[in-house]
Image: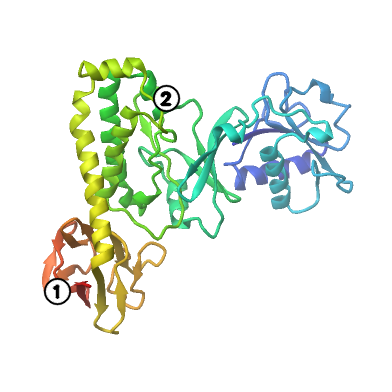
Amino acid sequence: MYRIGILERDENYLWRLVGFLKEHHKESFEINVKGGGFGLDAVDIKAVTYDALFLGDGIENAEIKTEEIPSGTVIGYLTEEDACDERHIGKYQSMEQIYRQMLKLCEAGADSEEGVAESVESAEPAAEAAQEHDGFRTEHVTENGETYCVCKIAEAAVDGLAVRMLSGNRIKGLLQAKYKEGVWRIRITGMKSMYDYVRENDGTKGKEQLLRFFADMIATALSLEEYMLSTDGLLLDPREIYVDKSGETILMPYIPLKSDMCKDAGQCLAEIRALCDTLLTGLSGEEKTQAAEEEDACGGTEEFDGLKKNAKDSLELKQRTKARDKADTVTYIIRKRTGEKVVINRSLFKMGKDASYVDYCIKDNPAVSRNHADIVQKPDGFYLVDKGSLNHTFINGRKLEAGEYRKLEDGCLMQLANDVFEFRSLTK
């Protein structure tokens, strides 16, 4: 949200503009007023720090002088004349266009070539802050005193449902974020990365807190399904996971990218556990400090041994299972009504009639629920789980309780409401 001031001689026009902005774009602007009025005394540039000031015709050099405006404040001009540059906004175009130009100026910051002072808090150099991840890139920027982790995502690649869920809910354990004009902006002001936290708190209490963080991260991962979010979106990088100012809360970023892959809860758990090993042995090939080596020698990391071993074992099992399944088996279902063959190409395969959420959409059967059932791959095979469907899920005529996992055998019949599927898992 940007704090803006507007100085305009025509108070009727000013009332209309401010009323429109407050009604339709209150999430973008905080418009400060003084004494309940919108006259020329409404903006006190000496008492309030503004991100932007918008001046009507004749205001500059009359009521205020631009040299009195604090450094870092963007200046825009509301004018009846033809706009001569991007800082000039035509008064009598649509209110929505005026809003977009105001927002653009706030986001872009000052234009130094036009003589407008740049913000004191400038973006950090991308070369220092940028991080490469699998399929995307993040960098840290500071704007108007706020720090963000930003990621550019083309609209064609963004998961719209995930964006709506994340924007409309405060999800415990996830960082707040917004998507606008191709940029996913995650607020991290005043926070410390998990990586830095561990380096600065490497004693016994710090490790105990780290264990609590892991437990909280697992709880968050398990809660995502309630919001129709996949654990694929979690960015499990200790440089991008943050501890809040209190030092008590861990917050993870979620990147709303469309993906053909889908992790189940077990795979996500293995990755979270693997963070323990990563944080203890150092990131990016960094050598252990002497203090860390001495601590290891005296048994300072004993409480982590079990987690480290489980993480390694889980990841090895995941890799062996994935390689074996890819090479040796073909898994699919056949819809009896139509004869359609559907390949199960994910470890978590969602079925229902909500095309924006599921992997296989059954849109021609109103008896099927929006998110009816999942097929979940585990190391010992595939399981069917009912997601609380209205008309229930069955295997060979036997009803599953909501949330119940039941193993699928080759040739068995799955039934979602009144739609029957044959499950096949064949060795090549």
**Helix, strand or loop at disc 1?**
loop
| Mark 1, residue position | 412
The reply to whether residue 139 is visible in this rendering is yes
| Vertical arrangement, residue 351 with respect to residue 49, above or below | below
Q: Earlier in the sequence, mark 1 or mark 2?
A: 2
User: In which quadrant is the N terminus drawn?
Assistant: top right
| Vertical arrangement, residue 67 with respect to residue 84, above or below | above
Q: Dot 2: few (<14), some (14–19), or many (≥20) neighbours within 10 Å?
A: some
Relative image position of residue 409 (x, y in whole percent): 13, 69
User: In which quadrant is the C terminus drawn?
Assistant: bottom left
Identity of the amino acid at label 2? Asp
The reply to whether residue 374 is visible in this rendering is no
Relative image position of residue 46 (x, y in whole percent): 72, 19
Is 383 in front, or is 7? 383
| Mark 2, residue position | 196
Which is in the foreground here, disc 1 or disc 2? 2
Res 74 → quadrant: top right
Query: At x 76% / y 31%, what residue is drawn?
Result: 39
Residue 330 lies left or right of residue 21; in this view the side is left
Residue 409 lies left or right of residue 36; in this view the side is left
Relative image position of residue 104 (x, y in whole percent): 69, 44
Q: Dot 1: few (<14), some (14–19), or many (≥20) neighbours within 10 Å?
A: some
Residue 361 lies left or right of residue 296; in this view the side is right
Q: CA distance from mark 1 to mark 2?
A: 51 Å
**Helix, strand or loop at disc 2?**
helix
Identity of the amino acid at label 1? Cys
Relative image position of residue 296 (x, y in whole percent): 25, 20
| Vertical arrangement, residue 96 with respect to residue 192, above or below | below
Colour scheme of the rendered structure: rainbow
Total numbered circles: 2
Is 246 in front, or is 212? 212
Is 87 in front, or is 250? 250
